[in-house]
Amino acid sequence: MFDPPDTNIAVGPTQIVEMVNTSVAVYDKGTKQWISGPTDLHDVWTADFPDCRLDDGDPIVLYDPIADRWLLSQLGGRNFGAECIAVSKGSDATGLYYLYEFMPAASTDYPKLSVWPDAYYLTTNEYSKRDAFLGAGICALDRSSMLHGDPAVSICFNTSTAFDTVLSSGVESSSDPPPLGSPNYILAVDNNTHAGLAEWLFHVDFNNPDHSSLTGPITVAVAPFNPICSSTFDCVPQEGSSQKIDALGNIVMFHLSYHNFGSYESLTAVHTVKVTDHDSNRTAERWYEIRNPGESPVAHQQSTWGPSAQWRFMASIDQDRKGNILMGYSISSSSIEPGIRYSGRRVSDPLNALEKEQAVISGGGYHNGDRWGDYSSMTLDPADECTFWYANEYQTKTGALTWRTRISSIRFPGCR
C-alpha cells in the first residue's frame, strides 16, 4: 500500500475496474465480486517496458464507450515521467492489452487521461530536470492507431507557466458524442484572478500535424473564489490528531465529463476553495456546469458547497443523461475522522442548488501522514447512462497505511 492511493474507477457494460497506486482489480458489475486481482500494476507491462514496471504512480483507468475498450495507465520511472498506457485488445478488462510508452519532452507529474472521438488526451504538469515548473502539457495520442496496436504518435502543446493542472474533456457514452470535428475542451482554474476558469480548444490533425492547434486561454467568468492552503497543501484537520492532510485545492479535479444534450453541450467541473464562517476558515467545493464550451463558454450554474463546519475536499463530479448532477468528496474536521460523502441535484431543482448531503461511509480513525487523494473518481455507467459510480478513500483506523477504498453507486429516481 502507498500514500496516497490515487483511487479511481472505470465502468463498462459488465465490469468495473478500480486502480490505486501499484495495483488494479476487476469486478463483476452484477455480483460486485472480484473476477481478477488485486494485481500488481507493473505486471500489465512486459519486460520490453522496464520503465513501466517501476510503478511510479498516478494510475488512471478509463473505459472507451465508443470502441468498447479499456485504458490502464501510470507514470514510468527513470525516464522523467514517461506515460505508460495499455489499451485492451477487446471488451474484457481481464484480457490482453496493446502496450505503449510515450516519452515526454520534460519531466512530468499528475497525468490525467480522457477519451475523445479523435484522440486520447493526456494532460500533465511539466518540469525541468531541476524541478522548475514549465507549465501544463497537453497531448493528443493517436487513438485510432492505439486501438489496433499500431505505432502511435503524440501531438503536444504547453500552456506556459501561467496555468497548471489542466484537464481534458472526456466522453462517457457512445450515444452523446460531440459534434463531428469538435475540438477537445481543456479547462483549468484561473489562479491569477480567482474569478474565472481558463479554457483552451485543442484541434488535432494526425495527418497534417502542423495543422493542429491549441487556442486559448478563453476566460469563463465565474463568481470570485478564495484559494485554500496556498502556503501548504496539508491544511485539513482530523479528529484526535494535530496531523493535517492534503486538500489539493485550487485545481480542477479529475475528471472533466462532457455531455451533448442536443440543444447544448455541457461540462461539469469542481475544485476546492476556502470559505470563512465566524472568522474560521475551512475548505468547500466550488462546482460548475459549463455550457457551450465550443462557442462562448458560460457558467450556466455554479455554487460553493459547504453546508456545515466540516472540511470538504478531493471531489469528483458528473452528470447523467437527464442532466442530474452528482458530486462525491472527502470530509474531515477536528470533530470527525476522514470519510466519504456526496450531494447532487435533480435537473428540476432550482439552479445552483444541491440537495441534502448523504454519507457513503464514516472514518474510523485518523491518518498518520499528510498525503490524501490525490484524486477520487465519479463516473457514469455507459449501460444506462443513469447510474453514477464513485470511488474514494477513507480511514478505517488510526495509522499511516490504514486507508481503504469504497465504491458506491447512486441513481436519481426518474432517470431511465
Image (cartoon, rainbow, N blue to C red):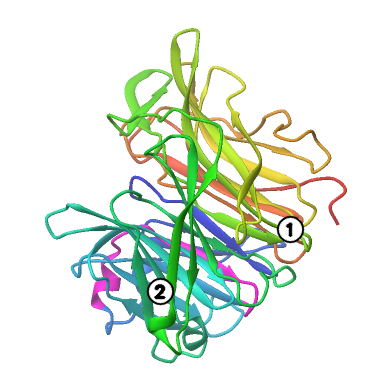
* Residue, disc 1: 264
* Cβ atoms under marks 1 and 2 closer than 8 Å: no
Indicate the amino acid at tag 1.
Tyr
Residue 70 falls in which quadrant of the image?
bottom right
Residue in front for this viewpoint, 340 or 196: 196
Residue 265 on the magenta segment: no
Q: Residues within 10 Å of mark 1 (few under 14, many from 20)?
A: few
Residue 114 image position (x, y, % from top left):
51, 65
What secondary structure is found at the residue carrying circle 2?
strand
Residue 332 image position (x, y, % from top left):
48, 26
* Residue, disc 2: 85
Residue in front for this viewpoint, 327 or 24: 327
What secondary structure is found at the residue carrying circle 1?
loop
Sequence-earlier tag: 1 or 2: 2
Residue in front for this viewpoint, 103 or 100: 103
One can see residue 315 in this view: no
Q: Residue furthest left?
A: 130
Q: Which residues are magenta?
A: 50-68
One can see residue 106 in this view: yes
Residue 61 on the magenta segment: yes
